[in-house]
Amino acid sequence: MTHLLELPQRMQFDQQLWVRVTVIENIYKLFGTVGAVFEMAAILTAIILVFLIRKHGSTFYWTFGGAMLLAIAFVSWIIFIAPMNAEFAKWLTFPIPSNWMQYRDRWEYAHAANALIKIMGLSFLVISVLVKTTEERDLMRNTLLDRAVLRSQR
């Protein structure tokens, strides 16, 4: 998410500043360690939740969608971002290529797309809770109405 919010400013950085912050100083260093733990925990938790509520109708589908979107975000990181990180690691010992902006653009936009996928995944999971809450509220309301009708018929 931070990459998405930082995107407009970072796209204005010149080569020296962008490479220094992103590659040399490695400002995102903890994202690869601490962030990876949280990402894996989120995906595994969502998958476990899908299994636990597999018989809960529409709630299941929203939860499944959310879990899949979180997994897709991780796969997109592997496909699009990890190779760029490997390329940037070379820049520590080799000259920065003249087309560095193409690398930067791919890396920045891949992070932005990844953040949007995660936001959608979280949204699906929140909707699944709202759907479940609405279904339970309606069930409770119908149960109370049924009881009231039964009492009035006595």
Image: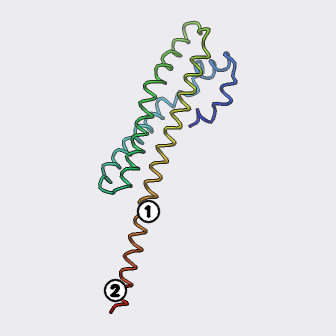
Disc 1 residue type? Thr
Q: Few, some or many C-alpha atoms within 10 Å of disc 2 (few <14, some 14-19, many ≥20)?
A: few
Residue at point 43% right, 62% down? 133
Alpha-carbon distance for marks 1 and 2?
Answer: 26 Å
Q: Few, some or many C-alpha atoms within 10 Å of disc 1 (few <14, some 14-19, many ≥20)?
A: few
Q: Quadrant of residue 19?
A: top right
Q: Quadrant of residue 144?
A: bottom left
Pick the residue in front: 142 or 75: 142
Residue receiving disc 1 = 133
* 45 versus 98 height, above or below: below
* Quadrant in which the N terminus is drawn: top right
Kindly state the secondary structure of the residue where label 1 is placed. helix
Percent across and percent down for residue 123 are: 49, 48
Percent across and percent down for residue 52 are: 31, 52
Pick the residue in front: 124 or 46: 124
Percent across and percent down for residue 153 are: 34, 90
Q: Residue furthest bottom?
A: 154
Residue at point 33% right, 47% down? 48
* 129 versus 144 height, above or below: above
* Quadrant in which the C terminus is drawn: bottom left
Disc 2 residue type? Leu
* 3 versus 58 height, above or below: above
Q: Residue furthest top?
A: 95
Pick the residue in front: 85 or 65: 65
Residue receiving disc 2 = 150
Kindly state the secondary structure of the residue where label 2 is placed. helix
Q: Quadrant of residue 134?
A: bottom left
In screen coordinates, is 45 left or right of 15?
left
Between label 1 and label 2, give the one nearer the viewer.
2
